[in-house]
Amino acid sequence: MRIVVADDSVLLREGLQLLLAEAGHEVVAAVGDGPSYVDAMLAHRPDLGIVDVRMPPSHTDEGLRAAVAVRRAWAEAPVLVLSQYVVASYADELLATGATGVGYLLKDRVSEVGEFLASLDTVAGGGTALDPLVVRQLLERRGDPVHALTPREREVLTLMAEGRSNVAVAEAMTVTLGAVEKHTQRIFAKLGLPPDDDQSHRRVLAVLRFLRAE
């Protein structure tokens, strides 16, 4: 993949470039601030853009605001936020920019390089990859208003939000694949996603509907 990287820490930026290069990817631009990230994404149109949240000048939410700006200018831009922090307001806005190619992972909770690289593939391929803590904080911010879903269905949807397949969800919950498929069909029905939609697209829409529910 061709990838743009944005992180204000030189060491982290260089380390991430080495990791990506070893995995066979090409870093076409590596920058240290939000405006440069926006410019690089729109200039190179990469397969994926990775961005930190807190960057110059204020070190608050520049990265997320830059990611939102990229998605507004290029709706299909695959964007993965990689940070130590969850900024719920802009995370919500980023998810609202579209139903494909979005991720939000927390640096301190990335424990396996292989899983991290798999998340990159997921987002670049149009899927979602959300850390469970990100999902939890977004839901807490909304008061978890999707009352039609059962606790089991919310668990399935949370795992789906992490980018897991039905097989991976079944393994995580220690249930059969058939049970997960029944849960997902009930989730789609409760969220009003018609059965004639593309299956993978419905999964993404279900996750975003869940996170954005009022």
Image (cartoon, grey):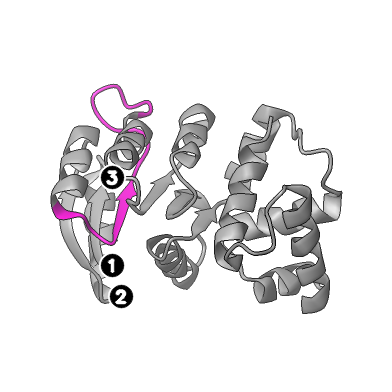
Q: Amino acid at mark 2?
A: Ala
Residue on which disc 1 sits? 20
Q: Estimate how packed mark 3 is, as few (under 14), some (14 to 19) or many (20 or more) residues with alpha carbons within 10 Å.
A: few
Residue 131 left/right relative to 148: left
Tell which of 169 and 72 is nearer to you.
Answer: 72
Q: CA distance from mark 3 to mark 1?
A: 24 Å
Few, some or many residues within 10 Å of mark 1 (<14, 14–19, 20+): some
Disc 3 vs disc 1: which is toward the camera? Answer: 3
Q: Nearer the viewer, residue 36 or 147?
A: 147
**What residue did someone put label 2 on?**
23
Q: How far across and down, in percent of the image, does residue 130 sit?
A: 54, 52
Which labelled disc corresponds to residue 74? Answer: 3
Asked if residue 176 can be seen in this view, the reply is: no
**Residue 120 placement (x, y as % from top left):** 40, 63
**Which quadrant holds residue 123?**
bottom left
Q: In the picture shown, does residue 73 fall above or below 44?
A: above
What secondary structure is marked by label 3?
Answer: loop
- The secondary element bearing badge 2 is classed as loop
Taking the spot 38% from the left edge, 28% from the top edge, the residue there is: 61
* Figure quadrant of residue 210: top right
Q: How many marks?
A: 3
**Mark 2 surroundings: few (<14), some (14-19) or many (≥20) residues within 10 A:** few
Residue 58 shown in magenta:
yes
Whether residue 83 sits left or right of residue 162 in the image: it is left
Write the residue at 15% across / 54% down: 44
The amino acid marked with disc number 3 is Trp
Q: 14 or 100, which is in the foreground?
A: 100
Where are the magenta residues, as a range? 44-61
For the residues bearing labels 2 and 1, Cβ distance under 8 angstroms: yes
Residue type indicated by callout 1: Leu
Residue 7 in view in this figure = yes
